[in-house]
Amino acid sequence: GWLFVAAGLANLGRLAAEHKLATVSVQGVTDPDNDPVTITITGITQDEPVNGLGDGDTAPDGFGVGTGQAQLRQERSGIGNGRVYAIRFQAADGHGGTCTGSVSVGVPHDRGNGSAAIDNGQNYDSTTTP
């Protein structure tokens, strides 16, 4: 059997919504036999439109499907409650053991202490341009 541990919701370090890309790695995935684990990003979604009101209209917002790391755009709608990305992944140990999972990453509406993005549903594919 496979075990994996991954963070629930991580904020992009209270970064300003500068429309730049931030590289995100899935960490904390372990194999019960201590085999090395390879992570492959299988999808990236978000809870705000890719090109929505007040977000700078830069698209796409997510990159890295098929690779070991995701790149997420540091932006959110200026009229919303922050953006939440969901990164889906597969982990493999090279000996036939695999598991799937997802982690969430938030871009808060503002940079104040205690600010957190609120997930309104993963309705948009971050890797597409509308």
Image (cartoon, rainbow, N blue to C red):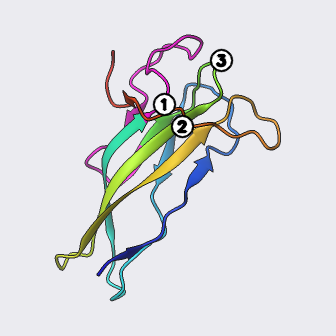
Q: Which mark is residue 76?
A: none
The residue segment tinted magenta is 46-70
Badge 3 amino acid: Gly
The location of residue 72, given as percent across then percent down, is 47, 37
Q: Secondary structure at mark 3?
A: loop
Q: Which mark is residue 47?
A: 1
Q: Of the two numbered discs 2 and 1 on the same chain, state the one appearing first in sequence.
A: 1
Residue extending furthest top?
A: 53
Residue extending furthest right?
A: 113
Identify the residue shown where x is 59% and y is 20%: 77
Q: Is residue 113 left or right of residue 110?
A: right
Is residue 61 at all visible to an observer of this figure?
A: yes
Say few, some or many: other residues with alpha carbon within 10 Å of mark 1 (under 14 / 14 to 19 / 20 or more).
many
Identify the residue shown where x is 41% and y is 47%: 87
Q: Are marks 2 and 1 in contact (CB under 8 Å)?
A: yes
Identify the residue shown where x is 33% and y is 55%: 89
Q: Of the two numbered discs 1 and 3 on the same chain, state the one appearing first in sequence.
A: 1
Q: Secondary structure at mark 2?
A: strand
Q: Which residue is mark 2?
A: 84
Is residue 64 at all visible to an observer of this figure?
A: no
Badge 2 amino acid: Val
Q: Does 63 appear in magenta?
A: yes
Say few, some or many: other residues with alpha carbon within 10 Å of mark 3 (under 14 / 14 to 19 / 20 or more).
some
Quadrant in which the N terminus is drawn: bottom left
Label 2, label 3: how far apart the Cα atoms are:
14 Å
Q: Which residue is mark 3?
A: 78
